[in-house]
Structures are given as C-alpha cells and as structure tokens.
Amino acid sequence: MKIGIPVEENKGLDSRLSEHFGRTPFYIFVDVESDAITKHELVKNPFEQHSPGQIPAWVNENGVKLMIVKGIGSRAINFFNEFGIKVIKGNCELAGDCVKEYLAGNTLDEDPACKHDHDHDTHEHHHSEKQPCKKKYGTVAISLQEKSLDSVIDDRFARGKIIAIINGETSKVEFIDNNPEEEHGVGPKIIGMLSEKGVNTVIAKSLGQNASLAAQEAGMSVKQAVNGTGTENLLKLWNEQLNEL
C-alpha cells in the first residue's frame, strides 16, 4: 500500500506535516508492506495553485490509497474518496512517526475536517448534519476479541478479552488486556476504571443492571453495539447510527 502525506520540508521521513493540504510545498509517498516501511519518495507539489479535485487526481495517479493529513476540507475529502483513497487525521509532527503510528494501529479513520480546518479546495464549513463532528462522543470504549479495531466486538463487555479506549481528541487507541477473575461486580469496576480514563461513551452489546447504573452515575452514554468489528461500530457511532442501550 502507498501512503501520501503533505509535508513542509524536504527531509524525507523526518519532514514535518504541513498544515495546508493544498498549499503544501511537498508530498511524501511511502510504500508499506507487512506493517513495515519499504520505500519513500519526496516530491514537489506541482499544484500549489490548483483547481478543486486536481491534487486528489494527481495523488491517485501516483498509486496512493491512504492520505494522512493535519487538516483538510470536507469537499476535498470527498474528491479523495471518489478515487477510493481514505483520508485520516495525523497527530504526529513528523511524517515517519505518523506512518509508524498508523501501522501500529494507533491512528483511527478520523474526520480531519473535525477541527474546523479549511483547505483551499473548499470555502464551506465542514460541520453539517451529514458530517457530524466525531469529537461529539468524546473518548469511546469498546470491548473486542483481539488488540485491533478491526477485530470482532466481544459480546461480553465487562468480561471481554480486550477493551479499546479511543481518545476523541487525539484518535489515540489504548488496548487494555481484560481478564476479570471476580464472579460478581465486574461491570461496575470496569465502568469505574473507564471513568478514571475519561471515557464518555461506551459501545456494548449488553450491560448488566449494576454496570448500567454505574455508567449513568458517571455520566457516560451507552450505545447498542451491532455485529461486526470495532471499526464498523465506531463508524456507525460517528454517523449517529447506534441506538441508546
């Protein structure tokens, strides 16, 4: 897979990410295989004065399948999506670090337009009914069967194998090994731990009565999970497609 990143300087993987997707002076294209960087190429942006859709088309011609950016307008995101290119938020200063974070599973498919950034491809405000801000749900917790957001959700929230905590501000993902030995009272204890970590929203197939009361007292929103992966449930949450549990 090839990853594209707009950068401010010609320093290879040590180049700093650019704040401006369209007016960035350089792009770095990074090839990855088997969760490792195999090659990278830094090229000058040929379209600093560009028409809408021109840069996404050029990036597509270079074989890019994923863009990591600091900020971009929703219209430009749509252009990339039309070419089958995903766009995610980069929270690192250096290009190489962002790629490593992504390969480690610590960068989520985030809405880069969610911080009110604008690109010269669009003059519209990103925040609309069709594109709710993902920060609305704060830090999210979900129980999974493996240490990956692409893992299937665990039916047992409090006794699930892994609990993933997704930071709503930074998109960082923390995976917690969960091996409860207690026969009773596990649910409220897990909710208490999540509250200490600043969790605002829980996605679960089911919660016991005591755990539900604990979540309510902690001010957490509890959403009904659907069959599928963690990523699928998160996307449904951010698109307001999960019901209250």
Image (tube, rainbow, N blue to C red):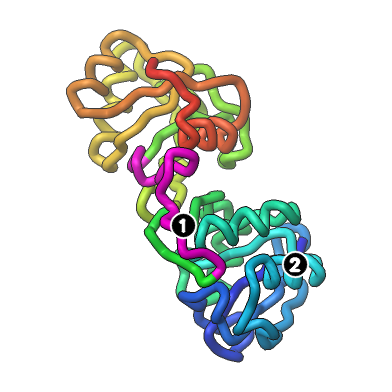
Q: Which mark is residue 72?
A: none
Residue at image position (56%, 26%) is 153
On the picture, is 67 further left or further right than 194? Answer: right
Quarter where residue 147 is shown:
top right
**Crowding near the residue tagged with mark 2, few <14, some 14–19, many ≥20 C-alpha atoms within 10 Å:** some
Q: Which mark is residue 113?
A: 1
**Crowding near the residue tagged with mark 1, few <14, some 14–19, many ≥20 C-alpha atoms within 10 Å:** many
Q: Is residue 166 at least partly visible in the picture?
A: no
Identify which residue, 122 or 34, lies in the foreground: 122
Q: Quadrant of the N terminus?
A: bottom right
What type is the residue that disc 2 sits on? Ala
What type is the residue that disc 1 sits on? Ala
Quarter where residue 124 is shown:
bottom left
Residue at image position (51%, 61%) is 73
Residue span colored magenta:
121-139
Q: Secondary structure at mark 2?
A: helix
Identify which residue, 113 or 205, lies in the foreground: 113
**Magenta segment includes 122:** yes
Q: Which mark sits nearer the N-terminus, 2 or 1?
A: 2
State the separation of the CA atoms marked 2 and 1.
Answer: 20 Å
Q: Residue furthest top?
A: 209
Residue 175, given in percent of the width and then of the height, sits at 47, 43
Identify which residue, 196 or 123, lies in the foreground: 123
Number of numbered discs on residues: 2
**Which residue matches tag 2?**
57
On the picture, is 50 further left or further right than 134? Answer: right
On the picture, is 172 further left or further right than 82? Answer: left
